[in-house]
Image (tube, rainbow, N blue to C red):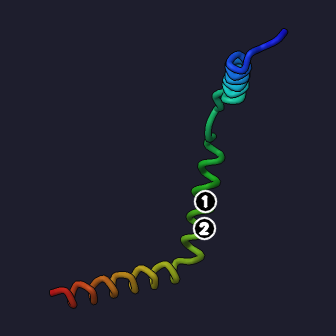
Amino acid sequence: MICSGKDRVKLWLWNFRNKWLMWEKPEDGFGTVEVILILVVLIALVLIFKKQITELVQNIFKQINASVNQVY
């Protein structure tokens, strides 16, 4: 079978579309276990770096207040 260039492009796009649709099957998404594990890790990181986070936030607010005072 001899195909013209236009037909080859159509065939390639059709095949690509079919492969894309087959690959894009809906998944169950995040489960409860995954969400809980992510939350546990985030809470642990906050507890581990609590002092550094507090100092960082305080320094940021000090710089903001100093900038505001310079403007007024």
Identify which residue is drawn at 68% across, 19% down: 6
Q: Residues within 10 Å of mark 2 (few under 14, many from 20)?
A: few
Give the residue at x 34% y 86%: 63
Image height of 6 relative to 51, above or below: above
Secondary-structure class at tag 1: helix
* Amino acid bearing label 2: Ala
Task: Work out whether 8 lies above or below 36.
Answer: above
Residue 72 image position (x, y, % from top left): 15, 87
Q: Are marks 1 and 2 in contact (CB under 8 Å)?
A: yes
Q: Specify few, some or many for label 1: CA neighbours under 10 Å numbering under 14, 14-19, or 20 or more.
A: few
Q: Is residue 30 visible?
A: yes
Tell me the distance, in whole angstroms, between the alpha carbons under discs 1 and 2.
Answer: 6 Å
65 or 70, which is in the foreground? Answer: 70
- The image quadrant where one finds the N terminus is top right
Q: Which residue is mark 1?
A: 40
Give the x, y percent position of residue 47: 56, 73
Specify the label residue 44 is tagged with.
Answer: 2
Q: Pinpoint residue 24: horizontal percent, then vertical percent.
A: 66, 29
Q: Which numbered tag is attached to residue 21?
A: none
Answer above or below: position of 65 versus 35. below
- Total marks placed: 2
Furthest residue in direction top, as rendered: 1
Query: Closest to the observer: 48 or 30?
Result: 30
- Can residue 18 be seen here? The reply is no
> Label 1 amino acid?
Val
Q: Residue at x 59, y 76 (%)?
A: 48
